[in-house]
Image (tube, helix red, strand yellow):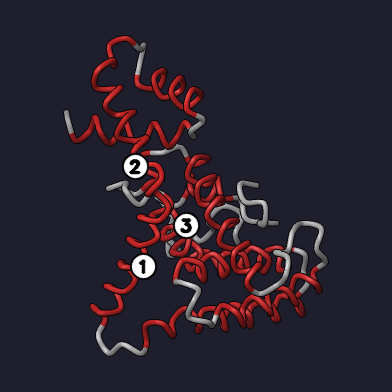
């Protein structure tokens, strides 16, 4: 699994299939039950765009599915742990019993209604709850599945409540975009200098490398950076300077 807190959903398969997925023509997305696929496709599209916020295209169309799944999995893990810490609980893992998992998610859902948690953190919580719901549904644990679905509805209401106060859809969209930009700036502030230096090095020395991939592999190992991060920087640079 690309997310340590997922027990069922195959994120890599999701991003392999999401480009062609349509509930009306292809009801199944990866191993997700068809009745949840449409909602989860929207959630995972949103999370992928946050993971690759500087990407001008849909990330799954230009990056390997396994890379998109890994980035989204990292975000879900990080945000879930922040919410669990604030709620003074441990995020449920694969060893946590179904009953204990429901209790933990119930506590986190209550805390999710607080304003200090932003739109994307709540989306991550809902994604984890849906993953657990899919597993329960697959194991025919219907009673527990209904309990989890009720939690999802509560978390979704908490997510929506940030926007229903506003009377205008454009104000809602602006707030969502502002949150995304603020989170992006926070996540990438420390890497801006490294990015500029690496792109300057690529511009000056690209002919000394066999390929873009060769450069990215060497630099990522040298500077202890993710290969996919360095590759995205260089690919976007080349695209805008072609």
Q: Give the number of the disc on residue 148.
A: none
Q: Nearer the viewer, mark 1 or mark 2?
A: 2
Hey, which quadrant is residue 161 in on the image?
bottom left
Height in image: 204 above or below 19?
A: above
Left or right placement of residue 99 versus residue 104 in this view: right
* Residue at 66 percent of width and 74 percent of height: 87
Alpha-carbon distance for marks 1 and 3? 33 Å
Residue assigned mark 1: 179
Nearer to me, 107 or 196: 196
Nearer to me, 84 or 53: 84
Residue assigned mark 2: 192
Which badge, 1 or 2, comes first in the chain's sequence?
Answer: 1
Alpha-carbon distance for marks 1 and 2? 19 Å
Q: Position of residue 122 (x, y in %)?
A: 52, 71
Give the SS element for disc 3. loop
Height in image: 173 above or below 214?
A: below
Give the SS element for disc 1. helix
**The C terminus lies in which quarter of the figure?**
top left
* Residue at 83 percent of width and 66 percent of height: 97
Which badge, 3 or 2, comes first in the chain's sequence?
Answer: 3
Alpha-carbon distance for marks 3 and 2? 41 Å
Q: Position of residue 21 (x, y in %)?
A: 44, 55
Height in image: 70 above or below 98?
A: above
Q: How many marks?
A: 3
* Residue at 34 percent of width and 42 percent of height: 192
Which badge, 1 or 3, comes first in the chain's sequence?
Answer: 3
Q: Give the number of the disc on residue 26.
A: 3
């Amino acid at each position: 699994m690309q997310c340590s807190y997922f027990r069922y959903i195959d994120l890599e398969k999701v991003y392999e299939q999401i480009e062609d997925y349509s509930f009306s023509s292809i009801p199944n997305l990866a191993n997700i039950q068809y009745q949840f696929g449409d909602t989860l496709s929207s959630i995972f599209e949103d999370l992928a765009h946050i993971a690759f916020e500087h990407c001008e295209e849909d990330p799954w169309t230009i990056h390997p599915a396994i890379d998109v799944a890994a980035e989204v999995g990292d975000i879900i893990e990080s945000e879930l742990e922040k919410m669990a810490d604030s709620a003074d609980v441990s995020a449920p893992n694969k060893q946590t019993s179904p009953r204990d998992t429901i209790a933990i998610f119930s506590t986190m859902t209550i805390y999710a209604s607080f304003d200090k948690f932003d739109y994307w953190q709540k989306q991550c919580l809902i994604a984890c709850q849906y993953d657990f719901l899919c597993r329960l549904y697959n194991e025919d644990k219907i009673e527990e599945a209904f309990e989890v679905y009720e939690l999802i509805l509560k978390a979704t209401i908490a997510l929506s409540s940030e926007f229903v106060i506003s009377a205008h859809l454009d104000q809602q969209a602006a707030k969502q975009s502002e949150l995304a930009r603020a989170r992006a700036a926070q996540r990438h502030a420390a890497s801006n200098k490294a990015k500029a230096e690496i792109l300057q090095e690529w511009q000056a020395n690209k002919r000394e490398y066999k390929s873009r991939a060769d450069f990215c592999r060497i630099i990522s190992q040298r500077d202890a950076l993710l290969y996919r991060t360095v590759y995205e920087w260089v690919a976007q640079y080349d695209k805008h300077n072609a």
